[in-house]
Image (cartoon, rainbow, N blue to C red):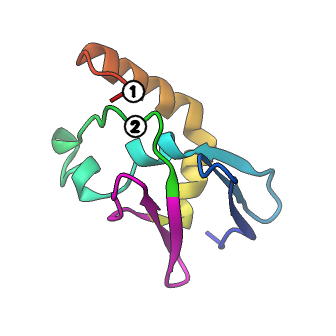
Amino acid sequence: MTAPKELRVSKDRKLLTVTFPDHAPFELPAEFLRVVSPSAEVQGHSPEQRVTVPGKRNVAITRIEPVGNYAVRIVFDDFHDTGIFTWNYLHALGHEKEARWQVYLAELAEKRLSRDR
């Protein structure tokens, strides 16, 4: 996967727009990125350890840091900063955003958790 030609954080810090060469931009909300973070804290070390993260409706992106030529670290205002978002993962999130979001909302409902704090 080639690097995006642009990563842009909105002024309110709630949306990351990712543009890959020869592809329409993906708009990825900060809340979505936070709850699907590829970190071990969220994903665990196996599918059984994956965590449903509640209360992130108002989370914002503090900064984005490059990681080599293959990824970025997204730092959120709740101090979460351990997820390394590879270009492949960002591309997959762009294509699968709606499906992943629906799975997340279903998990919240099943576990009686809320998007709000």
Indicate which disc, 2 or 1, sits on the residue closer to the N terminus: 2
Q: Does the magenta run of residues contain 96? A: no
Which residue is tagged 1? Answer: 115
Q: Amino acid at mark 1?
A: Arg
- At a point 53% along the width and 29% down the height, the residue shown is 99
Q: How many marks?
A: 2
Q: Identify the residue at horizontal 54%, vertical 61% (top origin).
A: 88
Residues shaded magenta: 62-84
Would you say residue 29 is visible in this rendering?
Answer: yes
Task: Tell me if residue 83 comes above or below residue 10 in the rendering.
Answer: below
Q: Are discs 2 and 1 less than 8 Å apart at CB?
A: yes
Among the 4 quarters of the image, the one containing residue 20: bottom right
Q: Nearer the viewer, residue 14 or 28?
A: 14
Secondary element at image label 1: loop
Q: Residue furthest bottom?
A: 68
Give the distance between the C-alpha atoms of the residues marked 2 and 1, in whole angstroms.
Answer: 6 Å
The residue positioned 17% from the left and 39% from the top of the image is 48
x, y percent for residue 63:
52, 67
Q: Amino acid at mark 2?
A: Lys
Image quadrant occupied by the N terminus: bottom right
Q: Which residue is mark 2?
A: 56
Percent of width and height locating residue 50: 23, 42
